[in-house]
Every structure is written in structure tokens, then in C-alpha cells.
Image (cartoon, coloured by chain):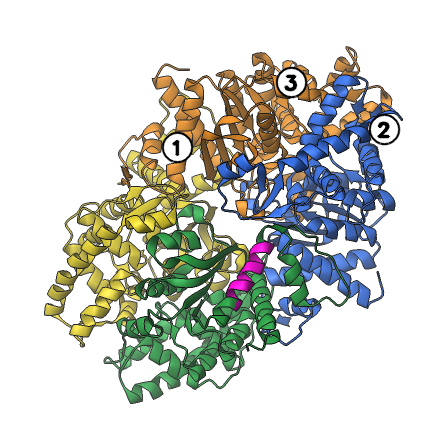
Chain colours: A yellow, B green, C blue, D orange
């Protein structure tokens, strides 16, 4: 049995020592420490790891951390929504997003052409320049063939980016598939539509993505999932897990709660009834916000793997 | 200025009187009453109304209510996830889901072939029979053509159902488009994939859906949105709204909170910075769970419209 | 096994039929129906019932409903915070609170002397008049003796009110003790302090309240708890329950979640580890906001008891 | 204007650098950094600081951190619930609490005499030994006088503890008042009651605490509040602030939300309508769980003050 221990400040304290101390504090801090352990174990056991996140996280400064994790070989497949794809491309081309306030005057922001995402902001100009970027990319790809799975499309877009901090770029470089099951649900969808109007045989074949979804890992592999937030990103990964024998490791990190019966708030426990997570899996559900919890978990896991020579 | 008033029990009290009284109680009950007013106003002003919901709501007994609202002409477009489509088809073929507990033994449920969705359950058999149902439907449609937009596909599937309480059936009957931007994110995706393996030219052209998305209503129409829960369903509707000039009426009902910066928790206020909702729109954000709040709002709005001869 | 059933609108639907239908919808609506059943059972089994609530609920229009439940003999002891006491007295003297917005300009409200409680407002004048009311009451009571338990004090204040919709008045009339363990935590505390400055022997003996807390019901009685919200009100009731053998029936209704380890968010399950709730008790935890959920539960339970001739 | 910046791992990263980087990530991480700044500013401006917390936090390993902050002179008054007092005394006498799971079998725990607080546990033995500890302490104090304010009582109890990590001990040593407005709401209340049964003139005069509450700081002092969680602890501090001219600095850290109109979930914004927080105050509301957020804030603020030679 483990005891509650006081967390105390000592000058120059490292992140690693802080997270270790949090592990004996109580409540979500204990789950945070368990999450670090699960992530470390995924690496040690050679699990194939799915990382899923919602597009507000790509809006935030988590984007570079996701890219770093892919670059370091800790992530083997990604699922996200198309907002992430759009903003990753924008950022790779130098667009900068602003830090603001949750309590802005939104009518005033609208007049200024500032689009609010919580306490962050994206300008209309960033979206306008995205359009200018995307069309030549699509033309180039269409020059090669007319029918693309979304995984292929995102891989080719990634290769065009050349930004070390880009999720798509690092994923493409490392052979990590990026799944985006609702690829039309954003500005990109509209641009794809306009492109198709001119080139009627242009098709994004989302059904074809299933091939990669069920073969990027095998039944025999140990499989892990780090699901940040909920929505289609989380669901798609657990669907894939279900089709390939269930997860051995899982970390769910979300502010959603189980009480509404939504998949977004569903716990790792509920997933076991479906076989999405194996009965004896190493699974942690954290109730917390990703912008704070995930960097703590990721940096602390990287630190530990680095210390043990496993990076 | 309006005053707080006590809510009191009187024998035989109607739902309508209860909801009216709730309107002067305080906190979310006040917002609930405002939500009823917005829904009633959408009808009175002839707005074109988007209804969006997550698939757990189709698992629940809200499914028949959604179908009833479509049948009564209160909903003009639907966005949902593919889980809703699957379960609507299952239910239309007689599958029944079970009421259980949030605190089940999930390993035991797994052994029994019971898949838990909060405090509801779906059996493995229901999924197995769904597969048997879907394939002949797909074959029939493929016999007509190989390339389908998902709106077309769902319309045809709906027409095959013949169940008054089916969302897809009522939508098809009433010419209401059902958008499902992540149509492969579920068992259906897997079945579409297996079908495509046999018929390689079979394509679900999700890009093509945009045509219907931006033309089902015009810039000149008054536009309304009832978004239940978040995720891709909510986002797709506000994306459509943004492309067609912004919403005049909006009701967001969700348990998600704005503090994580997620679109699911974003308020109607945040949407104004984007132009998704017009600056002067009639908009209500309710923090609450749809299985309780939505029936109260919908039944009370129907009651009022019925009393005023507007149904 | 029970099946999920669709909820449908029928013209003139009663509250009772709505709540019954909600019981087969899923998620919190199912728990709502279970809550009604527990409340009805408390009555049928002759349980002694604790009702606890936070002061924002007395600010709201739930106040009259609480008084009505006491009047009808469904509640046998109350625990609340002193804000409830203050506002119950204000309202009994004709003060009216306002319905406003969660998104007010609070600096502007401050200038206008409006104090915001969520989307409700209390004016400075109401507080000023409360002071004028309270002092003569205290003088009168001090004329009788100098040392008062808070239960005694609130009983005497209640008897002075003569308002059918007053919680304190109905409680005093029916011999229902009102516990207020933090009786100084509000404007009343400050007035008690000023009074004590003039009359140094005046004492509110909170320790003495324990006598009533552990004798208002016996070990042999069946005991029930309806805890609305959390805080000291909820905790004090479960403390009393622990000291008298544990609860047979419990309904926890709160928006707080268990994940922070707080007592406010603790479930009825956690309470069993302490013996606060008996192992085999009939207990329901609802995640929801009291202003909507509690009227539904209370009115529906009253309706059922009325139909069965049990009121 | 500030830009969103990626957070990246570098080997050996300090807590301080992590928290700085979090400040440009987005969502609650940005608010976290702002919270550190407010806490640092309170110190630099010589503000008198109120720290409030709920008793589950004293159960956890935050207890020693609270004591350390008092010892370092960063906290000038404390408000908490009596559970904190009880557990601080227990721990000062060597009782150890256990780390467990949120998903325990509570009936089994009950049989084993383990009382669950989220994912922590306290044994029945710890409570039994607390009783044995408390009675001689009370006897000793009663030997000096019969009527005690709760602030006086807790100060004397603190002086008897001699544990560097005890909140009560450090507070007593540093002349920091500990307010506990609901001092009877726990095991201690029951023991005070039993003691009073034997010594009828023994009184805990909670009204008398107001003297210290409104004089521990003056209208002229700059005033700050760090409110962790909600409940009577938070409310009592803002009541004191209201009576002494309002707060200049405030940090609210809680998982409660504003939507229920509860004081626990009320934002720093709402507090301005009351004058509890000054219109131009430096105020931050964080939506997060204290066991993770507070150590990050406190350790990071201490680190910065240490670097600047301000500790």
C-alpha cells in the first residue's frame, strides 16, 4: 500500500521531481503519475501507439509537442479533425495565432476579423492565405491521380511542408498515417468542393482509408492509445482498436464526463465492455484539460525514457 | 425587469405549466425557458432549422422524438455521426436496446456480449444483424450507380426503412438532408470497406455533400440551429452556417464547458466572433444533459405551437 | 430487463407522463426517474427525511417548493447555509429578486447596487432592509435568554415570519429543525457580531445543535437524504446519518464531479465506505443542476403520492 | 499582442521553464501562468493573503505545501472546514493516509474500516486515535477558560502540535488566524458536543471570530485571495473581503462551474458585482483540479520569488 505524501517546494525543482511528487498527493495528480507510467510502459513494451486529439489542440502550442513525439518515434498513428490539418499547414507557412481572453467582446472581434477559439485567436487573413496555399497543392496532387484516400492526401501535403514542428510533416517523414475521418468538416472541405467543381473526377475516397486503419498495426502487436479530448478522433482510434483485437494500453484525457453517455466522456472501463480495451489492459482515465495535463505527462515520460536511455 | 417566482406543485400539473414556472426559478431553468422561446420563434419566423446530435442520443429514446420533429416539419436538415445511422437502421428492423447501469462490471458485460453506452446497452447480436441488413441495401444501391454522396446514400437507406419512428425514414420522406461528415467512423465504415473490396469502383464521395450543405438553405433564409452535444455534428452545422451568412437563431445544449477551448464546449457567444452566429441573433447556451433538457424543450415548444395552431 | 423507449409528444401531455417517459430514454433521464422512485419510497416506508441545499437555491424560485415540501410533511430536517436563512427572511418581508443574465457587465451592476448570483440579482436595498429587520428580532430573542443554539434561533426567527412560502416559517410550524452549521458565514454573521458587541453575553452555541442533530431521528427510524448541491449542508446531513446508523435512502443531485475527491462531488457509492449510507440502501446519484432536476423530481413524486392518496 | 508558442521537451527541463512555456500554449495553461503572476504580484505588493481550501485537500499531500507557504510568510489568514483541522491533527500525530482508487468496492472497504475520499483512504483507527488525542487537548484548554472563539481554539491546538508540516502549527507560530466557520461539521463537532455534555459552560463562540475576521487586515492593506475549491471556506473569505473594502488580487481555482449559480462555481467576475473583488483587481479564474494545478502554481511562484530574492 502506498501512502499520501506531502509535496514541498525545493529551490530549482525539476519537472520530473514535481511530477513524481504529484504521484503521492491525491486525486487527479495520482492519475497523472499513473498516466506517465502507462506512456513509458507503451514504449518499453514496443507497443504501437495511436495519438488522437481535437483541432483546438493544434490551434494551441501542443502542436509542436505532437510533432516532437512523432519525430522521436513515440507515436505510430494519428487521428484528428480537419481543423488540425488546416492549422498545421497555416503554421507551417508562418501564420501565427494570438493569445487572448475567454471573456472577449465577440462582436468586436468579429468586426476586427479575429476568430476566437477559447482564449486564442486566429485572424481572417490566416484563413485567406490558407486558401491560396491549398489550391496549388491540390492541383499538384491531382496531376498525379484523381482518386485519393485521405491518408494518402495528408501524407503528400505533409511532405510539402518542410517544417520540423509540423505534425503532418513529421508524420509523413516517419511513415505515420494521419487519419482524418471527417476530412471535409472545415475550410478544407469547402476548398476540396470548389476544386471538385472544376475537376469532377477528383475524389477523396474515405472508405479506402480503412485499409490503412486496420493494417497499420497487426493483431499481434501490443497496441496503445493516447486519446486527448473526445469526438470523432477518439472514436476512430477505438474503432480501429476493436477491429484489431483491442488495446493493451490506454490513456483517456478529457474534460468530458461519463454521465451523459457520450463516447467523448466514456471511460476506459466502458471501453472494456466493447472489447475496445482488453480486460487486463493498463488503462488510465484522467479528468482534466489537455493544455496543462498533456505537456506534464509527455515531458515527464520523455524525461524518464531519456534517463533510461530509451529515446 | 422580471422577478424570481416560486415554483409550486398543483395536482395534475401539465408539462407546459411546469416549464413556464421553471422560467422564473433561476439558473439553467431560466435558460431552458429561453430555449423554448427560441425554438418557437424559429418556427414562427419560418427559419430553416438544422438539428445536430451525437450518436448516443440515437441510442437513447430521443431517436423517436427526432423523427417526430422531422415529421412535423420543424427540422430541415440533420447532422449526426454514423453511430446514429447504424442504430436508427437497427431499431427500424426491430433491434431493442437495454437500460442498465453506469456502474456495471464491464468485463462481465463483455463476456455476455453487451456493449455499454453509459447506462444503456447494445448486444453483439444487434450489430451482427445490422451487417446482414446493410449489405443487401448497399448492393441494391450499387446496382444503380457506383459513386454516391453520403447525403444521397442516407436518403436511399432511409427510404428502405418504413419505420415511422426512424430518423432516416422521416428525413427521406420529408426531403430533409442527413449529413454525416464522418460516415466511415463506425461499423458502417468497415462494411463499406468490405463492400469496396469487392467493388473497387464503389465510392462515397463526401466532398460532393458540400453542394447540398450550402444549398439546402439560402443566404436569404432565416436560419436556425439546435445543436445537441458537440463534436463533428455541431461543427459541421456551424460551418455550413458560416458559409451561408450566419445563424439568426441558435440553441446550444451541451455538458461540455468553454474552458478547454474545444468547439464542443464553445458558447453561442464565441460563435459570433467567427460570424457563425449573427451579432444580433437570438441565441441560448444551455449547460445540461440532452436526455432531460431536450425532451422538456421540444415537448414544451410543440405544445405551445400546437396551442397557437402553428403545427 | 427494461428496454429503451422513444419519448414522443402528445398534445396536452402532463408532467407525470413526461417524467415516466423520460425513465426509458437513457442517461440522466433514467436516473431522474429512479430519483422519483426513491423519493416516493421514502414516503411509503415512513422514512425520516433530511433535505439539504445551498443558498443559491433559496435565492431561486426553489424556495417556495422547499417550503411546500415541509408543509406537506415530506421533509423532517433541513440543513442549509446562512445565505438561505437571510434570503428566506428577506423574501418573507416582500423583497423580490431579479432574473438577469449570466453574462452581465459586473462592474456596471456594482455601480447600480445589483449583486449577481448566476443569472439572478439581489439589490443592495434588500440587504439594507434585512439589517433593519434582523436587529429587532435578535433583541426580542435576547430578551428571553442570552445563549441560543442555532436550531433554536432559527426556529424562533421562523415563527416570526408568517409567510406560507417561507422555509423557516413552515419548518418552525411543523417542528422541523433547520440546521445551519456555518451560521455566521454571511451578512447575518456580521449582524450577530455587532449585536454581541453591545451584549457580550449573547452567544450562539453551535455545539449545542448536536443534541438535536443526533436525536431528531433515531437509530431505529428508516432514514433518507435528499442532498441538493454539496458543501457543508450536504456534509452535515451525512455526518448526522453516520452518527445515527446510516441512511436507507439517498438522492444526491449535484453538478460537482467525483474526480476532485471533494465531498461535494462524492457519490452515494463513496458514502458506503464510511457507513454514511447503508450497504443495501436505495441510492441514486444524479449529475445535474437542481433548478431543473429538482422541480421535476419533487413535482412528479408529489403527483404520484397524490394519485395514490399518500399526501 | 502575445503569440501562441509550441511547448517542447528539452532534457532536464525545470518546473519553472515548463510553467513559463505553458503560458503560451493556450486554454487553461495560459490561465495557469497568469495565476503564477498574480501570486507573485501579491507578494511584491505586500498584499495580505487569504488562503482557503476544502478538507479533501488536507487529506491529500497539499497539506504540507499549505504549511510551507504559511511558514514562508506567503499566507496571512486561512479559512477551511473542520475536516482539514481533524486531519491536520491526525497527521501531526503520525497517522498516514492511503493512496487507492476511485473505483473501489466501497462495501468491501466499509468492512475493512477504510473510509474513501476519492482515490485516498483514511482508516477507522485514525479516527479513533484522533478522539483519544483531542479530549486531553480540550480539557487543557477548558482549564484556562470556558468560552473560546474558534480562531483562539485552533491557535492553541496548533501550538500543541509541533509538526513542521502541520497547517495549524505553522499558522499558530506565524500568528496566522485559521478560520473554520463550520467548526462543528465533523468528528470534532461530535467530540466538542460530548465534552460540553460534561462541561455545560464550555462554549465555542463562533460569533466572536468576526472580530479577527474583520481586523486581521485593514481597509488600507492591499488584499489578496487564493481560493482553492469552493464551499464555506471560499465564501467566508470573500465575505471578509467585502467587509474590508474588496480584494485587489484574486485567484479562484475550482472544478465547479458558474452555470448552476452556486457560489462555489462563481467567477471572479461575478464577485465584482458585489464589491467582493475590486473593479480593477488582478483576478484569475481557473477551471481545474487543485491537486495538479495548485502545486504547479505555488512551486512556480516560489521559484520565481526565490530567484528574485523575495523569499
Graded by Cα atoms within 10 Å as few (under 14), some (14 to 19) or many (20 or more), the crowding at tag 3 reads some
Mark-to-mark CA distance, 1 and 3: 31 Å
Q: A130 or C242: which is nearer to us?
A: A130
* Mark seen at residue D189: none
In this rendering, the label closer to the viewer, 2 or 3: 2
Tag 1 secondary structure = helix
* Mark seen at residue C140: 2
> Is residue D26 placed above or below C198 in the rendered structure?
below
Q: C33 or C162: which is nearer to us?
A: C162
B33 is within the stretch colored magenta: yes
Determine the residue positioned at 24% across, 79% down.
Answer: B200
How far from the left and from the top, in percent, is residue B64? 54, 75
* Mark seen at residue D34: 1
| Chain at numbered mark 1 | D
Q: Are marks 2 and 1 in contact (CB under 8 Å)?
A: no
| Chain at numbered mark 2 | C
When asked about the image quadrant of residue D198, the answer is top right
Determine the residue positioned at 66% across, 29% down.
Answer: D82
> Is residue C297 placed above or below B215 in the rendered structure?
above
Q: Which residue carries the number 3 mark?
A: D212
| Magenta region | B29-40
Graded by Cα atoms within 10 Å as few (under 14), some (14 to 19) or many (20 or more), the crowding at tag 1 reads many
Mark-to-mark CA distance, 2 and 1: 51 Å
Amino acid at each position: 500500500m502506498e501512502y499520501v505524501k506531502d509535496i514541498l517546494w525545493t529551490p530549482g525543482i525539476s519537472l520530473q521531481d514535481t511530477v513524481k511528487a504529484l504521484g503521492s498527493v491525491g486525486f487527479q495528480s495520482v492519475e497523472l503519475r499513473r498516466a506517465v507510467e502507462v506512456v513509458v510502459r507503451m514504449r518499453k513494451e514496443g507497443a504501437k501507439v495511436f495519438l488522437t486529439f481535437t483541432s483546438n489542440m493544434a490551434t494551441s502550442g501542443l502542436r509542436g509537442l505532437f510533432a516532437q513525439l512523432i519525430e522521436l518515434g513515440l507515436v505510430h498513428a494519428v487521428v484528428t479533425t480537419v481543423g488540425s490539418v488546416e492549422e498545421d499547414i497555416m503554421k507551417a507557412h508562418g501564420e501565427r495565432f494570438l493569445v487572448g481572453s475567454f471573456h472577449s467582446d465577440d462582436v468586436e472581434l468579429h468586426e476586427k476579423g479575429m476568430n476566437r477559439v477559447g482564449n486564442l485567436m486566429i485572424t481572417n487573413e490566416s484563413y485567406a492565405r490558407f486558401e491560396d496555399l491549398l489550391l496549388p497543392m491540390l492541383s499538384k496532387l491531382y496531376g498525379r491521380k484523381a482518386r485519393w484516400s485521405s491518408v494518402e492526401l495528408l501524407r503528400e501535403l505533409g511532405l510539402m511542408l518542410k517544417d520540423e514542428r509540423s505534425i503532418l510533416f513529421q508524420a509523413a517523414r516517419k511513415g505515420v498515417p494521419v487519419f482524418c475521418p471527417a476530412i471535409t468538416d472545415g475550410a478544407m472541405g469547402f476548398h476540396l468542393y470548389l476544386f471538385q467543381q472544376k475537376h469532377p473526377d477528383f475524389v477523396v475516397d474515405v472508405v479506402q482509408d480503412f485499409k490503412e486503419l486496420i493494417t497499420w498495426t497487426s493483431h499481434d502487436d501490443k497496441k496503445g492509445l493516447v486519446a486527448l479530448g473526445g469526438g470523432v478522433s477518439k472514436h476512430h482510434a477505438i474503432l480501429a482498436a476493436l477491429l484489431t483485437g483491442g488495446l493493451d494500453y490506454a490513456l483517456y484525457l478529457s474534460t468530458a464526463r461519463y454521465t451523459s453517455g457520450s463516447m467523448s466522456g466514456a471511460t476506459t472501463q466502458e471501453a472494456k465492455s466493447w472489447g475496445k480495451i482488453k480486460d487486463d489492459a493498463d488503462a488510465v482515465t484522467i479528468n482534466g484539460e489537455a493544455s496543462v495535463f498533456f505537456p506534464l505527462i509527455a515531458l515527464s515520460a520523455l524525461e524518464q525514457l531519456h534517463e533510461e536511455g530509451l529515446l
